[in-house]
Image (cartoon, helix red, strand yellow):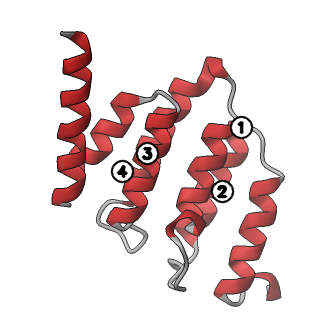
Amino acid sequence: IADIENEENRYRLFMELLESSHHEAEFQHLVLLLQAWPPMKSEYVITNNPWVRLATVMLTRCTVENKEGLGNEVLKMCRSLYNTKQMLPAEGVKELCLLLLNQSLLLPSLKLLLESQDGHLREMALEQITAVTTDIF
């Protein structure tokens, strides 16, 4: 219990578990763990946000064959946080969308951007759509 009595210990434990996770089922267990814990309130850079860290590791450790499936899992994970205390701030959504784009996962990225209530993120989505349509024509 001492391992999870405060936010710092929870984050440390989460990072240890994340480092040892390599399979989709393990990542799903980490999602459940983060949902069960209180939201982390400490001031930290957005790339250290546990949800962003989890998605980053999921996408970087996956194989090419299941990359699209994991992109959709990241989308589902983010959607599960909507209207909860765990909901990602706009910077977190942006970070995940950039990560998805870097992994050539345009559709999940666009969905996250367009579902956002943040005007800057929606503008980013329109820029991506414009870039894609410009490339086509």
Residue pictured at 84% horizontal, 52% vertical: 20
- In the rendered structure, the answer to whether residue 125 lies left or right of residue 72 reads left
- In the rendered structure, the answer to whether residue 32 lies left or right of residue 118 reads right
Going from N to C along the chain, the mark reached first, 4 or 2, is: 2
Q: Position of residue 99 (x, y in %)?
A: 50, 44
Going from N to C along the chain, the mark reached first, 3 or 4, is: 4
Asked whether the beta carbons under mark 3 and mark 2 sit within 8 Å of each other, the answer is no
Picture layout, residue 74 above or below residue 81: above
Mark 3 = which residue? 98
Residue pictured at 54% horizontal, 58% vertical: 52
Asked whether the beta carbons under mark 1 and mark 3 sit within 8 Å of each other, the answer is no
Give the Cα distance between marks 1 and 3: 17 Å
Rendered-image quadrant of the N terminus: bottom right
Q: Secondary structure at mark 1?
A: loop
Q: Nearer the viewer, mark 1 or mark 2?
A: 1
> What kind of residue is marked 1?
Arg
Residue pictured at 68% horizontal, 32% vertical: 62
Residue 61's tag is: 1
Q: Secondary structure at mark 3?
A: helix
Mark 2 = which residue? 30
Residue pictured at 42% horizontal, 61% vertical: 92
Give the Cα distance between marks 4 and 2: 16 Å
Q: Nearer the viewer, mark 3 or mark 2?
A: 3
Residue 79's tag is: 4
Asked whether the beta carbons under mark 4 and mark 2 sit within 8 Å of each other, the answer is no
Q: Nearer the viewer, mark 3 or mark 4?
A: 3
